[in-house]
Amino acid sequence: MKEVVELAKELLLRPSVTPDDAGCQALIAERLQRAGFLCEQLRFGEVDNLWATHGSGGPVLALLGHTDVVPAGPRESWSSDPFVPEIRDGVLYGRGAADMKGSVAAFVIALERFAAAHPGHPGTVALLLTSDEEGDAIDGVRHVADVFRERGQKIDWCITGEPSSQDKLGDLLRVGRRGTLSATLSVKGVQGHVAYPEKARNPIHQAMPALAELAAHRWDEGYESFPPTSLQISNVHAGTGANNVIPGELQALFNLRYNPHWRAEQLEQRCESVLRAHGLEYSVHWHRGGEPFYTPEGPLRNAAREVLARFSGAAPEESTGGGTSDARFIAPLGAQCVEIGPVNASIHKVDEHVAVADLEILPDLYLALIERLLL
């Protein structure tokens, strides 16, 4: 399957750092149009999105991916240019090789082969790509999902190509993801001299007990295969830099990763009740990154389990761990969602890579899933 390697290399040559698609989707659309797909470009702001479909009616199976990548960092830290793909010892190196241009290339090859072999297939097979997965994720799949909701566009099953495997291709099947909720908290005090604390109000002293309570709180005991909800404080900042000045304000950043026990609004209310109980003068800006989703037993999960076992030689672990993915925007449309992709050991790292042998298997794996679900 050399074709998938060549396509992956073509995509890796394009420095598509979020939100710049750098021509990746145009290249893919041209190929899929030749294969009989209808392609729709959906550009919102600086973000490119591609919706390519083949067939009509239901069921609708969507392959979901992104063409954008995170910045490569200093060139000298890499063994070779991050935007000039290079194969060394059976491994393809380049920014986005694993996350997720390798999967995107495999999607395209699988779709071309499926359309050629089954031109009159039942239902609809589709590819949805964005250039805004690694960034703020505002004008990417989140926005596209809003458009689909207005149109009444239905998606029954969604397969995301995120690098989900742990040690061996196909050893893990992602069947859900936690929600993510971020907060920027500002606590007001009164600036003053440290020798006269009675004339000031120290926001650090006031905020620390509340933050400690939030950090120590046991939110729940988990949900089915989801771990317990957790809150992590990622930054606390206050002060002028002088050791004799009580600051007038403190800012703290924290994030909750939560399971289906919760909705974002409920967590916001619970957190703010703690802040109020400590008598803080505060303001908080919430960013709802996405609600949790979970795919129960059903056609998609059964098909994925069967196909992965066939390709990897053993039943996959079924997990809801990890961070978030764009599937969190597709699941609320009523879709069952799973994530299947290459080994994730090098994503967002220097010398990001994917094994050529795994990359060559991926189109066959995705094709088997498509055929299992639609034929």
Image (spheres, rainbow, N blue to C red):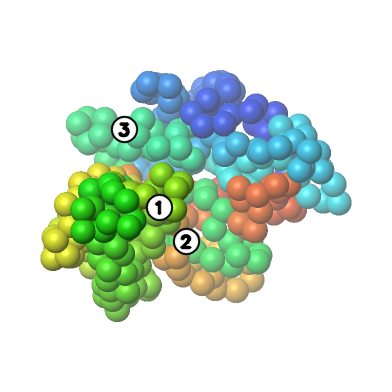
Q: Say which residue appears at 21% left-offset and 53% top-offset.
A: 199
Q: Which mark is residue 143?
A: 3
Task: Inspect the image, locate mark 1, and give the three-letter code of the amino acid beneath it.
Answer: Asn
Q: Residue at x 76, y 43 (%)?
A: 77
Closer to the camera: disc 2 or disc 1?
1
| Residue 331 x, y percent position in the rendering | 31, 50
| x then y, percent, for residue 309 | 57, 68
In the rendered view of the protein, which quadrant contains the N terminus? top right
In three-dimensional space, the C-alpha distance between marks 3 and 2, rounded to whole angstroms, equals 23 Å
Q: Which residue is mark 2?
A: 322
Residue 55, horizontal then vertical, whole percent = 40, 33
Question: Relative to residue 184, is residue 271 drawn left or right?
Answer: left
Report whether residue 307 is seen. yes
In the image, 174: left or right of 90?
left
In the picture, measured across the screen, residue 95 lies left or right of residue 45, that is right
Is 51 rendered above or below residue 333?
Answer: above
Residue at disc 1, secondary structure: loop
Q: Sequence order check: which comes first, mark 3 or mark 2?
A: 3
| Residue under the point 57% across and 39% down | 70
Q: Nearer the viewer, residue 104 or 191?
A: 191
- Residue positioned most to the right: 89
Identify which amino acid the numbered label 2 is placed on. Gly
Q: Earlier in the sequence, mark 3 or mark 1?
A: 3
Q: Residue at x 31, y 32 (%)?
A: 143
Quarter of the view holding residue 358 = bottom right
Residue 323: x, y in percent? 45, 57
Which amino acid type is shown beneath numbered disc 3?
Answer: His
Between 16 and 34, the one lying in front of the other is 16
| Dot placed on the residue nearer the N-terminal end, 2 or 1 | 1
What residue does disc 1 label?
Answer: 244
As drawn, 359 above or below 3: below
Q: Is residue 337 visible?
A: no
